[in-house]
Amino acid sequence: MKKCIILLLILLPVIVFSQTLTDYSDVYFYPHILSPGDILTDGPRGEPVEIKESTVLIWVDYYPLADYAHPTLYTLISHESVRLIHGMWSPFLNKKSILLNEIGQYALISPLKLHENTPIGFNVYIFPHELNSNDVIADGPSGNIFRLLNNTLFIWVDFAPNAKYAHDTAYILLAKRRSRVEKGSWWPILNNKVILYNQTNKLAVISPFVLANPYEQDVIIDESAP
């Protein structure tokens, strides 16, 4: 019995530290649009991520308190595609560290309109509230329904904002257990209510967005894209 108590006392700090690391994730919005020629790497010595056109960067730190290699996620949004790229470090842009520990310095304005007056314009919408497994997102009134496994930050990309018919959209669901991109053709419906589409008031979403994820251990990254 005494040995068991001693073992528990030894393991208790480890257990508490492990749980502390998994309490939340930080979602950072880079305040500038990436351009062709920019060099983005995961850490100072990571492989360069190709930037071929104007791109929005969102970086997720799944374990903000960890000061060693740990799972992170790069979300890259451009007119051509939405890419989810997993990493183990913080982002470096043109050989300079960005976003890490930059708390409350930036805000992303939603909707973010890129190339607004050109044929390839598109809008990026950030839903300003955390969603959970009780919420239901649908692609239009009769489209696919996307299941949320745990607390999620929802981002919707409208690739043809002026279109009044079915067209390409993207549903970006950022969560510790499973981050993914789903293809869409319509506007998002949350719990039977249309959201984001034709949003008239702009919203400022502070970076980082703190996404609560109590005691989640698994990080599964689905790199599918529309």
Image (cartoon, rainbow, N blue to C red):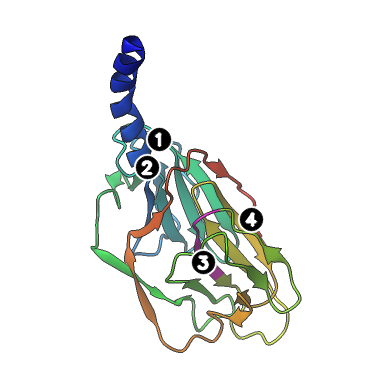
Which amino acid type is marked by label 2? Tyr
Determine whether label 2 and label 1 are within 8 Å by CB: yes
The Cα–Cα distance between marks 1 and 3, rounded to whole angstroms, is 24 Å
Give the residues drawn in magenta, as a range.
150-156
User: What residue did someone put label 4 on?
Assistant: 225
The Cα–Cα distance between marks 3 and 2, rounded to whole angstroms, is 21 Å
- Report whether 39 appears left or right of 138: left
* Residue at far top of view: 3
Q: Residue sitting at 60 percent across and 48 percent down?
A: 223
Q: Please tell me which of labels 3 and 2 falls first in the chain.
A: 2
Q: Please tell me which of labels 1 and 4 falls first in the chain.
A: 1
Determine whether label 3 and label 4 are within 8 Å by CB: no
User: What residue did someone put label 1 on?
Assistant: 70
Classify mark 4: residues with Cα within 10 Å, few (<14), some (14-19) or many (20+): some
Q: Position of residue 130 (x, y in %)?
A: 45, 64
Q: Position of residue 116 (x, y in %)?
A: 49, 81
User: What residue did someone put label 2 on?
Assistant: 63
The image quadrant of residue 33 is bottom left
